[in-house]
Amino acid sequence: MSISPASFDGQHIRRVYDEDTETWWFSVIDVVQVLTQQPDYQTARKYWNQLKRRLDKEGSESVTNCHRLKLPAADGKHYLTDVATAETLLRLVQSIPSPKAEPIKRWLAKVGHERMQEMADPALSLNRARQTWQQHGRSDKWIQQRMMGQETRNKLTDYWREHDIKEGQEFAILTNIIHQEWSGVSVQEHKAMKGLKTQNLRDHMTEAELIFTALAELSTRQVAESHQATGLKENKQAAVTGGRIAQQARRQLEAQTGQSVLSAGNHLPPDHAPKKVGSRRRQTGSGGPASQD
């Protein structure tokens, strides 16, 4: 996941983009603080807790649809925070009497509109991403590989949408299967290896990791297309097969070079990078990380 703070009327609103599920998540308390016009964060938090209890008693789905993610706070630490999609927040806004209600509804709708524009014209999304990566010091070669991988990813998720795969949890399940098969570790294990928390894993991959991720996802889509895989069960099978195709290529490369494709390297700022990342690689006969197959 990639944290991308936004600003509404000069007020900071934390938001996270989950690339695996292609979903924006917004901090509910930050939005409540805007609506209640409370300068004190703790007062806004108490207001939200009371509202949450009331809505929960009323059986509101808005509360059920909220999730919890670790977001950075003013003290620099990460804490579990209630988050919701723009769609859920639009419903929550109706429960809070505020002169800011209509402006923030328009702001949330604008975020959704921008995403729809990017889906209709992926070049908009890629241009924004290229600018962000350049600002973070990524090389042109890395950016090119990252963008090629994203195009491969988009084609795969387009196929999933058209073949009865639900965005959100099912996207995440299939993504993790593919990653587990090609790399031998889950997405979360790979993030831990790199010392990542809320950051987007792909934004911290090496060129080789990006290439093998793209190969696994390309193979998965082509296998799924050849069998017209529909629904979660059939696409799980395609994900396993596609991931193992990339796994075989990884093992061959590792056998020739004697080096693991998986890396603990990341692009975190020096004071945020882990002081020491121990090797989590389990040895196999090919010298690469063990694969759960």
Image (cartoon, grey):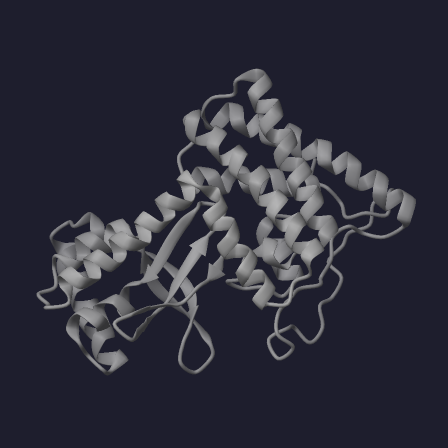
Task: Estimate the x, y position of residue 28 in percent, counting from the top left.
Answer: 28, 64
Taking the image as shown, residue 188 lies to the left or right of residue 119, namely right
Image quarter of residue 205: bottom right
Residue appearing at x 50%, y 40% in the figure = 173
Does 170 sit above or below residue 162?
below
Does 30 sit above or below residue 59?
below
Image quarter of residue 9: bottom left
Residue appearing at x 71%, y 68% in the figure = 277
Quadrant (top left/top right/bottom left/bottom right) for the C terminus:
top right
Can the viewer see residue 64 in this picture? no
Residue appearing at x 71%, y 73% in the figure = 276
- Of residues 49 and 88, the one drawn nearer to the viewer in this rendering: 88
Taking the image as shown, residue 264 lies to the left or right of residue 203, namely right
Residue at the top extreme, as displayed: 227
Image quarter of residue 42: bottom left
Residue appearing at x 68%, y 37% in the figure = 215
